[in-house]
Image (spheres, rainbow, N blue to C red):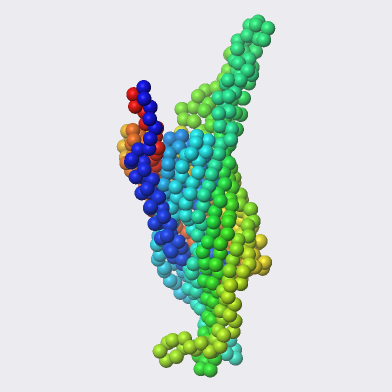
Amino acid sequence: MIRRNFFKTSDLASVTFLFSLFVTLSFIQISATAQNTSSPYSRYGIGDIGGKGFGQGFSLGGTHIAMQNDTTPIFFINTGNPASYSSMRLVTAELGANYNRIQLESSSAKKTINNASLAYISLAFPFKRWWGGSIGLVPFSSVGYKVSDEQEIGSVGTVKYLYQGSGGINQVYFGNAITPFIGLPRHYLMSAKYARLHSLKRPDQTVKSCHEVYEDTQSIRKDLNRKKFLQSLAVGANASYLFGNVENTRRSIFPATLYAFNTCTGTNTRIDGMYFDYGMQMAYTVDSIRFKDKADTCRPVKFRDLKENVKILFGFTFAAQTNVNATIDSLSYSYFNNSLGYEIVKDTIENTQGAKGKITLPLSMGFGIGFKKGEKWLVAADFAVQNWSNYKVFGQTQGLKNSMRVSLGAQYIPNARPNASYAKRIHYRMGVRYTQTALELKNTPLNEYALSIGCGFPVGRSYILQNFSMVNIGVEFGQRGTVTNGLIKENFLKATVGFTINDRWFQRAKFD
């Protein structure tokens, strides 16, 4: 028998194609960050923070902390909890695009803005049965707004304030996760303790009584359950490089005064630095229910197998407070507009270039729990907080509040078997979320509510070739803010189209 290991040509072609696609789309993603939002509230802090879920998590209300892959395809990438990478069994690629439609409403006017952008691109690899990793490019935050406000000032008259901003922060990450206790149940079944409990004889070779056999069987069951639960422990971390720039401009315009000069103040903040976030996941499988049999005095407690196992999922995420590098260019000047509408600069008020310092990103943590019944039902919930009151720019706090997010999502698959009808193999998803944002303006907290629905459509499923694909489509409806106290309410519709591709690479070929 002759055995040869080699990489298939098709595998190398897939690697080359996906790597080229990754690099190309990464440049597109970087250039498109500024178009990810049209919210006037993105002028505060570092902008609107990007969601953690890809195509699947988006339709589940952003729920992701406890989400992990099962042992059967299709596999999804969950960057929100890096511990999930350890459950990857196939090479997975995910990419998606977003469409946003936002209606800005004040007490006197309404305006609708549309934009679209590349949302994310990511790759994940199962290095070992106990080790998985992922690499990708996702938006960390985005800024995009243009709002105006007019006020009457007694001795001056009408003053129009114009606020405008663009840009955002990109995040290139590389994550790894391991399951440190994999194989623990197998080692237990090979141990001397198991052999002693499993034997029908005592150490002195006398036969165990019926009650002793029952007690030993119960001990084995409890030991195995503990070993399986500990084996499910997965820990992971993402090492991310944050980079990007944010431009903010504020103009004071005096339209009714001939001899007053308008003023403009603009800042360009460039950000770069490392950012680390961590995750942990565990799962407990319930495969039977306990009941008492009073008629059996030898085995009074018995177990009845469930038709479908119930898996209970647990997750935890954490990111410590982090300082990243920042460079700020600031320019303030007075000007007037000539008869052709061009700006004519009169005086420079301030010109500071290359001021260096730190921006403090606050601590965040989250907890998640999920319940999965067989392959059909999945229900999960998240609770996450972030300490934005500690957000600082060059050592100065910015008046933000601590934020909180609660979300709930559910997924239903009528029949995941490959021979089922197509409609039964579709993944049907729904979610809700509530966010208490970091903003409190004019003593009014800004909260966000959203409802999402979506579907995952299988494409090209093949259990022989071990490749699986899915198109994920999701829509979210929600609102943020209020029109009271002169604020702006946002009614938004967000849609995403994502592609998930699973494939098995670098198989060891064997020849006889």
Tell me if residue 464 comes above or below residue 165 in the rendering: above
161 and 188: which one is in front? 188
Tell me if residue 270 comes above or below residue 301 in the rendering: below
Query: Residue 364: where, in percent of width, then height?
Result: 61, 53
Query: Residue 264: where, in percent of width, then height?
Result: 54, 81
Residue pictured at 59% horizontal, 23% vertical: 188
Tell me if residue 434 comes above or below residue 428 in the rendering: below
Residue pictured at 46% horizontal, 66% vertical: 34
250 and 132: which one is in front? 132
Res. 453 visible in picture: no
Query: Residue 379: where, in percent of width, then height?
Result: 50, 42
Res. 268 visible in picture: yes
3 and 212: which one is in front? 3
Q: Residue furthest bottom?
A: 259
In which quadrant is the C terminus drawn? top left
Judged left or right of residue 254, residue 220 is right
Query: Residue 306: where, in percent of width, then height?
Result: 49, 27
Q: Quadrant of residue 416?
A: top left
Judged left or right of residue 410, residue 397 is right
Residue pictured at 54% horizontal, 59% vertical: 242
Q: How many marks?
A: 0
Q: Quadrant of residue 332?
A: bottom right
Q: Residue furthest top?
A: 206
Judged left or right of residue 280, residue 113 is left
In which quadrant is the N terminus drawn? top left
Residue pictured at 54% horizontal, 76% vertical: 266
